[in-house]
Image: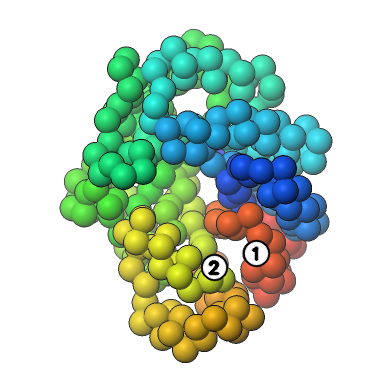
Amino acid sequence: MRMKDLYSRPQKTVSFEFFPPKTPETELKLLETIQELKPLAPSFISVTYGAMGTTRDNTIRLVERIKHQEGIEAAAHLTCAGHTKDEIALILAELKAKGIENLVALRGDPPKGETEFKPAANGFAYASELVQYIRQDHEWGPAFSIAVAGYPEGHVECRNKREGLQHLKIKVAAGADVIITQLFFDNRDFLDFVADVRALGIKIPVIPGIMPVTHGSQIQKFAAMCGAKIPLEIQQAISRFGADQASIEAFGIDYASHQCAELLRAEVAGFHFYTLNKSKATAAIYRNLNLGQSSK
């Protein structure tokens, strides 16, 4: 089922995000995680794309397995980084041939060590150009449902929120079906973002991206990468628990559960969980909120 149709249903749409494994050992672990999360009946699972398209083959292979062997709807991330238009066309053709109907269209990050994004020759500089390319093609346009990224606290390369919202409006006008946000820890940032999005006349679903705190230094790294601020309560917990992994995980599950409960009261359409290829925290949040009952 396409994301556009999933989000048109009355029940909550809850999705998980994985990244492609790099070794046979981590792939086995990821497959175990999928089996552990499968009973939660996620609406779909998305699989990320490595920097400059480095995990392209793994991404495609994994989404194909998730959809056709595991029986869970899947979405493939697709980035502009490192790809020409012709290469993008080949990827789209392969995804369509494998029955993948959902895409998360992103610009992508600069290569490690570089701060400025440089599009490939005859490639795309922005996610909006990628979305437009897909939608305007007679073959690709009808074939895929497309999600794009939203940034409640502003993009790390564009801290002017008003300018960032205009960029988002262009992506939506190009043909996006849903907005999935970057991680955030203060619900006020998300709710204000949604209000600003609606004020621009954007009506498509805006889905909060949730990353439970399961490891102190790891969450600090991800927050810095995406420009998300870490509230004092989380900072204090990271400092207090230090290397006590069980305690920081318990705190993170409790914090995310309260965060999601508040968002449910605000009538969000669903959640997109950044799982970091682990099942424990996401499963615990599901149990705390009875999401397994409301997302089927």
Q: Position of residue 200 (x, y in %)?
A: 27, 46
Classify residue 132 by image quadrant: top left
Task: Answer with left or right where residue 125 lies relative to residue 21.
Answer: left
Q: Is residue 32 above or below residue 65?
A: below
Residue 290 at what x, y percent from top left?
71, 69
The first of marks 2 and 1 along the sequence is 2
Tell me which residue sits at (18%, 53%) in the image: 160
Discs 2, 1 touching: Cβ within 8 Å? yes
Q: Secondary structure at mark 1?
A: helix
Q: Is residue 109 left or right of residue 255?
A: left
Relative to residue 194, is residue 102 drawn left or right? right
Q: Alpha carbon of mark 2 to alpha carbon of mark 1: how far?
A: 8 Å
- What residue is shown at x 25% (from left), y 44% (from top)? 115
The amino acid type of the residue labelled 2 equals Pro
Crowding around mark 1 (Cα neighbors within 10 Å: few <14, some 14 to 19, many 20+) is many
Whether residue 31 is visible to the viewer of this picture, yes or no, is no
Q: Residue at x 68, y 36 (%)?
A: 62
> At x 55% / y 30%, what residue is drawn?
56
Q: Does any portion of residue 160 appear in the rendered image? A: yes
Tag 1 residue: 282
Question: From what the image shows, is residue 135 above or below residue 223?
Answer: above
Q: Nearer the viewer, residue 274 or 189?
A: 274
Is residue 232 toward the left or the right of residue 60 in the image? Answer: left
Coloring scheme used: rainbow
Q: What is the secondary structure assignment of the residue under circle 2?
A: loop
Residue indicated by mark 2: 212
**Image location of residue 159, percent across then percent down:** 21, 54
Q: In the rendering, which numbered label is found on residue 186?
A: none
Percent x, y of residue 145: 54, 31
